[in-house]
Amino acid sequence: MLNLRDEITCIYCWARFAPEEVLWVSEHRDLLGDPLLGSEAQLRFLPTRFDVAGNAVDGRGETCRDLACPACHLTVPRSLLVRQPYFVSILGTPSCGKSFYLAALATKLRRSLPTRFRLSFSDADLATNLPLARHEEQLFVNDAPDRPVALADLIPKTQLQGDSYFRVRSGENVVSYPRGFSFLLEPLERHPSFALRERLRRLLVFYDNAGEHFLPGQDSFHAPGTRHMAESEFLLFLFDPTQDPRWHQAMRRAMPDVAMPSTRNSGRQESVLREAANRIRRLLKIAETARIDRPLIVAVNKADVWKPMLGGTQLERVIFETKLGIDGLNAAEIERQSGLLRGLLEQHVPEVCLAAESFSKRVYYVPVSALGAAPTYDEQGRASIRPASIDPWNVMTPFLLGLNVSANGYVARFADDGAAPVVNGRTGRAHDAAADAAGRDSVENHA
């Protein structure tokens, strides 16, 4: 018997509804045509007949398999009826590398969560996740791994329309909703929380919007594509320092003999944080100066290029095997790196720190490299890379950190005093703007 949740949240339009209100997707070819999705979509309907297995039977007698949201009619995973969703928003400017980062992250999580962290991680909906799976294949199972490929051909830029969005009719209008990539997450055997697996089963949903959607004025009734941010457990802001002219100049001074990457400047990146904060405050109906009580992870991308700017300071591993027999996070090293990176950002792009710390009460700065290797550039500035040389660095840390500080029971951590690792509890210190104003650099997180 299924233990259905009392209230369901759609992963596309974020409408809330009771499980008995969920629609089914017809199977018979004569039932083509849905009032919200168009003539090529199968009809959605509220069933009155079921087979012995509990599946709905459509008006032509065909057994149905897929479910749909009663508000937007988009197909939702069956697991949404029994698993609490865990939303994660990835935001950033156009061309900052969000799609590359998400593909690298998904591949690393597939390979490492089950074996190293004893957490199951699998696709909740293969069809919906297909665009992300194709990106992963392009990067990591490429047919010609030693042949240089233009980055724009490996993963095309996410467009405001296309297969990253679903179009739904609403009266006389058409509304675009972002595609949520969904995964099943739960503890496996030998995980310290395995006995609590029923309570810890989650439907993990990532959102990768076109960067233009995060710019001021781009959120509307017709394109409410970033409203998942108000539902997210934590937010991940991908900052591309090579897009900022000030950082670019600092890199040239620190590394005069190194060819600098040529990255298109998409505008002031802190404006994305400020716009996101304003949208979330409006949706949550909180004061315009209030800081949200959700973690914000600032992932500084392309670390393979800018690491020499740390002046020889080493970035040690933050993931180690714990005494529990599973991998966990080293809270002290995460805190040290967050402080180093914050200092570097404050020196060259202080507005990013100010925007982040006026946005969230808990801010962490994490170095990452989605590719792990610098691409080469032709005379026109087009970037290329050999897929065989792609080796993502530290891309799991922002996700694992966000999971640890926003949800108990999943990721082990080392206590700061060297005591035995724990699974329930939050790791590290978050940079807090109010604490900085009082003369302190950070404040301790409390569970």
Image (spheres, helix red, strand yellow):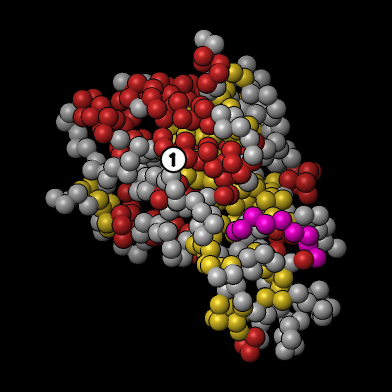
Measured as percent of width and height from the top left, residue 178 is found at 52, 58
Residue behind mark 1: 272
* Residue 221, image quadrant: bottom right
Q: Secondary structure at mark 1?
A: helix
Using residue 419 as the reference point, say whether residue 127 is left or right of it.
Answer: left
Measured as percent of width and height from the top left, residue 344 is found at 37, 23
Q: Residues within 10 Å of mark 1 (few under 14, many from 20)?
A: many
Using residue 369 as the reference point, say whether residue 166 is left or right of it.
Answer: right
Image vertical order of residue 288 relative to residue 23, above or below? above
Image vertical order of residue 121 relative to residue 337, above or below? below
Q: Considering depth in this image, is 362 or 214 the residue closer to the camera?
A: 214
Q: Give the quadrant of the N terminus.
A: bottom right
* Residue 417, image quadrant: top right
Q: Considering depth in this image, is 218 or 227 the residue closer to the camera?
A: 218
Q: Is residue 18 visible?
A: yes
Identify the magenta region: 12-20
Q: Residue furthest top?
A: 439
Q: Amino acid at mark 1?
A: Val
